[in-house]
Image (cartoon, helix red, strand yellow):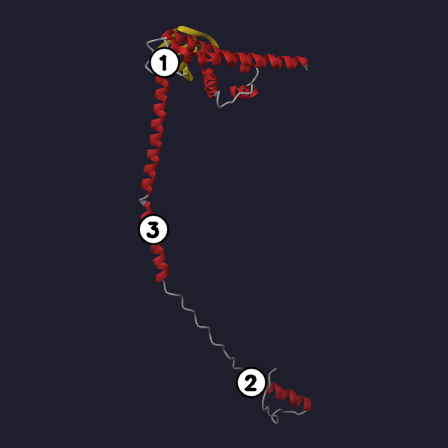
């Protein structure tokens, strides 16, 4: 337990030292106006400040990666305000994003640093060497661009340094993808427009079906056939009844019997 507390304390001290050094570098550039007569900063001062900023960002990034922390988490842990440290947080995030291309920081290539000073700002591009290998066994570089004004460092951005052939390849790929997307959209639009020719035909077919259904005569209901009254010839029935009565009376002939009516049940 005691050892873990010591490690945490050491980590916090190291991070605070890195951050303090970076803040000092950011603030020192604001003193340049008093140092020079022809401008607020000289080329050598701007170059030194920008290169030291790149080195401190590299060390701070390695320390944060060692302890698995983000810059925002460190600022909050140290009791700082993330909004006030927005410049440092943005610079570190830019460094981390670019490091996916150039790998780990090796050194600052001081001979390739470019400084451009105008009336109101100094634009310094610091070239750094990374360890990420790309084509022809070359190591990827990156550019740390530091913009310095009279108030101090205004912005810090980090971007991988690509060769012209790589830039042309990416540009060609983007062009092909863009043109392919445009042609695909144009083909889709042309297909939709061609479908408009079939819409009137479909409407005409529905219109004809509706007209035929409305003009067709209503079916005439067939007349129900009249009930057929069966007229049964009762002559045979009368003879049978008369014979039955004569037999029941013991008469020889049924001639003397007359059936007046027959009631059916």
Question: x and y percent of residue 95 in the render?
Answer: 46, 16
- Residue most toward the top? 111
Count residues near mark 2 (Cα–Cα under 10 Å), then give few for <14, some for 14-19, many for 20+.
few
Residue 52 visible, this orientation: yes
Residue 57 visible, this orientation: no
Q: Is residue 191 above or below residue 136?
A: below
Count residues near mark 3 (Cα–Cα under 10 Å), then give few for <14, some for 14-19, many for 20+.
few
The secondary element bearing badge 2 is classed as loop
Q: Which-is-in-front pick, marks 3 and 2? A: 3
Real-space Cα distance between discs 3 and 1? Answer: 70 Å
Real-space Cα distance between discs 1 and 2? Answer: 136 Å
Residue 234 is labelled as 2
- State the residue position of label 1: 122
Q: Are marks 3 and 2 in contact (CB under 8 Å)?
A: no
Chain-order first, disc 3 or disc 1:
1
Q: Are marks 3 and 1 in contact (CB under 8 Å)?
A: no
Real-space Cα distance between discs 3 and 2? Answer: 71 Å
Question: x and y percent of residue 210 in the render?
Answer: 36, 57
Q: In which quadrant of the rendered view does residue 245 lie?
A: bottom right
The secondary element bearing badge 1 is classed as strand
- State the residue position of label 3: 203
Question: x and y percent of residue 193 in the render?
Answer: 32, 40
């Amino acid at each position: 337990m005691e050892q873990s507390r010591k490690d945490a304390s050491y980590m916090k001290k190291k991070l605070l030292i890195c951050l303090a050094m970076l803040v000092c570098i950011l603030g020192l550039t604001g003193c340049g106006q008093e140092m020079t007569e022809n401008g607020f900063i000289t080329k050598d001062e701007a170059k030194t400040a920008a290169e030291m900023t790149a080195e401190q960002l590299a060390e701070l990034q390695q320390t944060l990666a060692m302890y698995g922390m983000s810059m925002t988490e460190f600022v909050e842990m140290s009791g700082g305000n993330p909004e006030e440290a927005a410049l440092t947080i943005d610079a570190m995030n830019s460094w981390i994003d670019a490091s996916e291309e150039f790998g780990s920081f090796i050194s600052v290539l001081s001979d390739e640093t470019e400084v451009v000073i105008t009336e109101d700002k100094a634009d310094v591009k610091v070239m750094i060497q990374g360890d990420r290998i790309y084509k022809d066994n070359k190591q990827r570089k990156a550019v740390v661009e530091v913009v310095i004004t009279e108030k101090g460092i205004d912005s810090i951005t980090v971007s991988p340094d690509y060769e012209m052939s790589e830039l042309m390849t990416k540009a060609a790929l983007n062009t092909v993808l863009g043109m392919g997307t445009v042609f695909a959209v144009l083909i889709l639009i042309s297909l939709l427009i061609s479908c408009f020719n079939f819409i009137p035909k479909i409407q005409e077919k529905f219109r004809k079906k509706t007209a035929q259904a409305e003009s067709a005569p209503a079916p005439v209901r067939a007349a129900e056939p009249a009930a057929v009254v069966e007229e049964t010839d009762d002559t045979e029935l009368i003879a049978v009844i008369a014979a039955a009565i004569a037999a029941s009376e013991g008469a020889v002939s049924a001639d003397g019997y007359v059936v007046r009516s027959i009631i059916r049940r």
